[in-house]
Amino acid sequence: MKITSKTEALNIVETSYLASLSSLLWVALYYLPIGGALLRLILPLPMILLHLRRGSKIALEGLLIQFLLLFIIMGPVRGTLFLFPYGILAFWLGWCWFKEKSWKLSLTGGVVIGTLGFLLRVIALSTLVGDNLWVLITRASYGLIEKFIGLFNLPLYPSILSIQFGAILLIIFQEIVYVLTVHVVAYCLFPRFKLTIPDPPRLLNSLVDFNN
């Protein structure tokens, strides 16, 4: 392939570099016993950065390169898990911010992608380890419901349906916090790279005031 312009060269270099960086972060998140919360937070940022700098076509190429790298390094199951939700979430947020969509749209879509991705990971990892990991989530849900009932001395006993519903609410709440935090970090960090994302709604202005 003959490179005919500086733009083409930059597209190739940035795509390769940022896809490799994001792949390295995923490998570190999967295998290192420390720093998981921080790695999860910054994991989508390289591909979002690529999307904002080079557009949707280059971002898709970067996502494909990253998928192939992880598929080779980690195998078909662990490598593919990156896409659910981090890879798809990174592309979604990058697209929303590249098109200057509102936080309401990017947050809502991000939470849906994150929730579905979490459920897919539970299914895949349960198959991989030969154990039902959903039980761990329902136990956490049962514990919270039991504490809530005990706190208010309610004459109730949690049903199976309420426990399952509580588990889903826990996942959704976790994804809301995660996706919102990614928004705030990107809003504060990307101006340093001469990139901007849409301003947050007034309700969330207090979360990003420290950037001013």
Image (tube, rainbow, N blue to C red):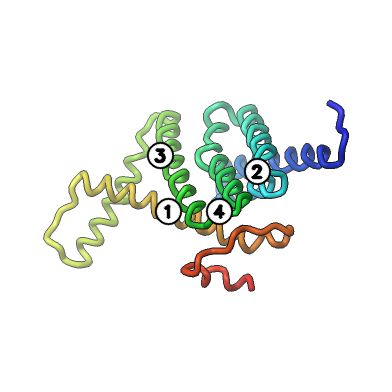
Q: Earlier in the sequence, mark 4 or mark 1?
A: 4
Q: Is residue 148 left or right of residue 44?
A: left
The structure residue drawn at horizontal position 54% and vertical position 37%, both measured from the top left corner, is 83
The percent coordinates of residue 115 (x first, y second) are 42, 45
Question: Residue 3, located in which quarter of the rendered image?
Answer: top right
Q: CA distance from mark 2 to mark 1?
A: 22 Å
Q: CA distance from mark 4 to mark 1?
A: 23 Å
Q: Is residue 206 left or right of residue 193?
A: left
Label 2 neighbour load within 10 Å: few <14, some 14-19, many 20+: many
The residue nearer to you, when weighing 84 against 206, is: 206
In the rendered structure, which amino acid carries the disc numbered 2?
Answer: Ser
Asked whether disc 4 touches disc 2, contact meaning CB atoms under 8 Å apart, the reply is no
The structure residue drawn at horizontal position 42% and vertical position 53%, both measured from the top left corner, is 174
In the rendered structure, which amino acid carries the disc numbered 3?
Answer: Leu
104 up-or-down from 131: above or below? below
Q: Is residue 112 left or right of residue 153?
A: right
Q: Quadrant of the N terminus?
A: top right
Q: Which residue is mark 3?
A: 119
* Discs 3/4, front: 4
Q: Earlier in the sequence, mark 3 or mark 4?
A: 4
Q: Which residue is mark 2?
A: 22
Asked whether disc 4 touches disc 1, contact meaning CB atoms under 8 Å apart, the reply is no
